[in-house]
Image (cartoon, grey):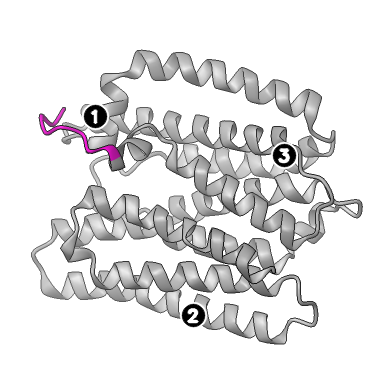
Amino acid sequence: MRENRPTPIWLLPNLLSLDAPLVAVAWLYMLASTWRVDFLPWQAAAALAGAVWVIYASDRLRDARRRLGAGMPLLRRHAFHWQHRGVFLMLIVVVSLITLRLALFSLPPGIFVYALLGGIFVAGFFMLGSRGDSQEVPYLKNILAGLAFAYGTAMTAHVFLLTQHMGNLLLSKEMLSFAVLCIINITAIDVWEHSKSSADVEVKAEDEFSLTLPLALLAGAMLVFALKSGNIYPRPFFYAVLIAAAALQILNRNRQRFSLDLQRVLADVCLLLPFPLFFIMRL
């Protein structure tokens, strides 16, 4: 269940499920800036970070239990959560209550209308379960996870617009582009694990291509969106998605140089990389 190697500092955000909330908050501010949200209170970022953390920590505890039930070895992040499950369960309750309080008293009431659809995405994600004893990449689960992550991040910014409407959010190029990026990012982790567990050269090639093609299509679409945008404000956002997609592809091609743990961390770094560049492009 537990590895005896010392835990490197760079892995702690991943083991503590803090990486996903950090990515969500970074893209929240990029979306808010793109949509020219006049005022985004810190409570919005805190509520988003809390909700994302609760979902991720809960999912890792559930995956750990199912892996143990199936007789599968625990991955490092699962082993860490299971070893400290008492603390994590207590924190999940506390963070859930704080997040609910922030949503009730600090966010616009419309957030609960938006949250209905987000709740459906999250419920579908949990209903699909974990990989269990299957070695196949759970594409459908990853699609729902990416949609839930992107929609939840985008709605937290969109609800502060004066002309807020859930239909406009669902048709937003920014939200859809970010959703595709999230889906690919989440899928990449499973694809890399699948590729490393196989000795078949053809399987490894197929796994790499399964990421290369969508990343190339996403990058191409972002370039078209940026160049054809009649409004200058969305362009840095599309370039930010393009930069993240390019970084993921570079990591995909060079992943053999890194351990699986480092691959997971670097995948999140790829999504954080555009954050400072986005605001430089805004100048």
Density class for disc 3 (Cα within 10 Å; few <14, some 14-19, many ≥20) is few
In magenta segment, residue 7: yes
Q: In the displayed structure, does residue 250 sit left or right of residue 73?
A: right
Residue at figure coordinates x 80%, y 46% from the top left: 159
Q: What element does badge 1 sit on?
A: helix
In magenta segment, residue 209: no
- The residue lying furthest to the right in this view is 162
Residue pointed to by mark 3 = 116
Residue pointed to by mark 1 = 79
Name the one closer to the observer, 282 or 99. Answer: 282
Residue 46 seen in the figure: yes
Density class for disc 1 (Cα within 10 Å; few <14, some 14-19, many ≥20) is many
Q: Which residues are magenta?
A: 1-9
Residue 65: image quadrant is: top left
Q: What element does badge 3 sit on?
A: helix
Q: Which badge, 3 or 1, is on the more N-terminal residue? A: 1
Residue at figure coordinates x 71%, y 39% from the top left: 115
Where residue 52 appears, as percent x and y from the top left, is 54, 37
| Image quarter hosting the N terminus | top left
Q: Amino acid at mark 2?
A: Leu
Q: Which badge, 2 or 1, is on the more N-terminal residue? A: 1
Picture disc at residue 217: 2
Please tell me whether residue 224 is drawn above or below residue 33 in the rendered image.
Answer: below
Q: Amino acid at mark 3?
A: Leu
Residue 137 seen in the figure: no
Residue at figure coordinates x 23%, y 54% from the top left: 193
The answer for how far apart the CA atoms under marks 3 and 1 are is: 32 Å
Determine whether label 3 and label 1 are within 8 Å by CB. Answer: no
Q: Amino acid at mark 1?
A: Ala
| Image quarter hosting the C terminus | bottom right
The answer for how far apart the CA atoms under marks 2 and 3 are is: 31 Å
Please tell me whether residue 85 is drawn above or below residue 15 in the rendered image.
Answer: above
